[in-house]
Amino acid sequence: MRNKWLFDALLPAAVVVAVCGVAIGGMAQFARWPFPLENWEGGCVIAAKTWAAGADLYVDGLAGHVPLTNYPPLYLALLRVFAVSGSPFLAGRLIGVASVLGLAALAFAFVRQTGAGRFAAGAAAAAVLLTRENLLLAPMVRCDALAAALSLAGVVVAYRWASSRAGLAAAAAICVAAWFTKQTAVVAPVAVFAWRLASERRAAARFAAYYAVLLGGAIGLAELAFHGLFLRNIIGFSRSAYSLADLAHHLVRYVRPAMWPWRAVPLAGAAFGLVAAGRAGWRQSPWPAYFALCALSLAALGKEGATLLYFYEFHAACAVGFGLGVSRIALFDRAAGRIALAGAALCFAALTALLFRGMLADLRHAGDAEAVNMVRAAAGPVLLEDSGYGLLAGVQQMDLITPFIASRLAARGQFDFSPWIDNVRARRYALIQLESPADRPSLGTSLRFPASLLSEIARDYVPAAVAGHGYFYLPKAAQAAP
């Protein structure tokens, strides 16, 4: 190819810079958003603040205490360290954005390690930043993006130093860090083990031993540090019902026609990666095992409360596959193919910019400031489905910071909602906020509050306002005596 430097260095650099500019600009605007983007964020920040104040992070939910969180401690520790006074969500948002940018850098590094050129590696990085969910979910105060970045980092380190004991030990340590960020982050170590087992059994056994010792030791220390409540909270309190119907629902929504433009990049990445793996050899890199396990991990979408956050690792694997395919498919060895791919990337970047613009406009008109003011003005205790509003309002009397965890325990007969139902019946709450009407609850609201509590709210409280992502209720006036 003539002017190889142009197509293997300058063109990918220009495209990646343009895509990064759009992605970083859009994510930065979401990161500065001062109100909760979804209902789990407030609970994460409150758990980190409570822990920082010296209280126990994990409590015995089986003894009637309301669990604060079922997250492992690493992400919450980072929220503590990087907390910004006056902006409770900013630290978590920046961690999420940095994690997605880290995923892009790791995808670039993975593809380069296969011997591919900068154009193919740049395509992998751009694929991360042109995947809709990566960008829109990154600013959320959730552990998923960081866990995905640590998992891919573990795979990249294992691939780079596959024959080094120190390298495998470092990869195992990174995978343990991913597990201590999100307890379901087990794809990476299994993928590394499967890849090494297929070519070098001693290395596979060595990696498995490192991982088992480091994970077991870290869990043991955590059990001591958290008074024997660590595994009970992050494993026992995370169990929920499973439904094949829910799995089918999420997968159908993922591929529905309205989403086809946004699915082009990850699904093309999956196809490109499989073509590349078939040509290079399935044992050549850990990507085939990593991709297969990421795809299988989507079965977790059948769990109650599953969200699009579960796609992070799958999308990361698809992005790497995209770059691997570009390096192996003859079309992209020619100038015309590379120019066409660069043009498509820029079109997707423009589409992404329009998406950010529309969603930010929707946020600004949602009325979150009004919602916070209503909570702040409440003359008494409040019951909030989104505890983020209470956090911003400085509420001290706030019940059920993480209602989803409590409701899952209640469904197994391990938690009693009776005190909260009695409070509603007695109209002790000055204000109640739900994300959907009490008499027509959404699936999410139904998973956070039992039907008996919602029916009492509908009976003893009256709708007062709709603001932000909440329906606000006030207690009915006392009936005059006859």
Image: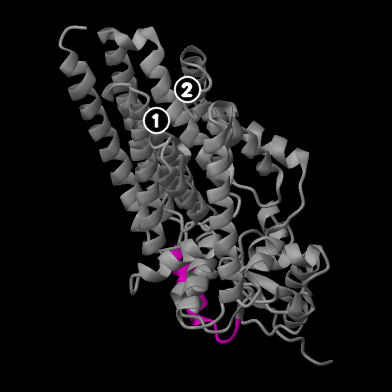
Q: Is residue 287 above or below residue 83?
A: above
**Position of 125 compared to 301: left or right?**
left
Residue 189 part of the magenta-drawn span: no
Q: Nearer the viewer, residue 252 or 378?
A: 252
**Residue 441: percent from the left, percent from the top?**
71, 57
Q: Is residue 2 above or below residue 49?
A: above
Indicate which disc residue 284 carries: 2
Residue 378 part of the magenta-drawn span: yes
- In this rendering, the label closer to the viewer, 1 or 2: 2
Within 10 angstroms of label 1, few (less than 14), some, or many (20 or more) residues?
many
**Position of 216 compared to 344: left or right?**
right
**Residue 227: percent from the left, percent from the top?**
62, 78
Q: Quadrant of residue 183?
A: bottom right
Name the kind of residue labelled 1 in the image.
Ala
**Residue 128: percent from the left, percent from the top?**
40, 35
Q: Nearer the viewer, residue 467 or 5?
A: 5
Q: Residue shown at 77%/86% (left/top)?
A: 479
Residue 285 visible:
yes
Secondary structure of the residue carrying numbered label 1: helix
**Position of 472 compared to 89: left or right?**
right
Within 10 angstroms of label 2, few (less than 14), some, or many (20 or more) residues?
some
CA distance for labels 1 and 2? 22 Å
In the rendered view of the protein, which quadrant contains the C terminus?
bottom right
Name the kind of residue labelled 2 in the image.
Gln
Q: Which residues are magenta?
A: 368-381
Q: Which residue is mark 1?
A: 127
Q: Which badge, 1 or 2, comes first in the chain's sequence?
A: 1
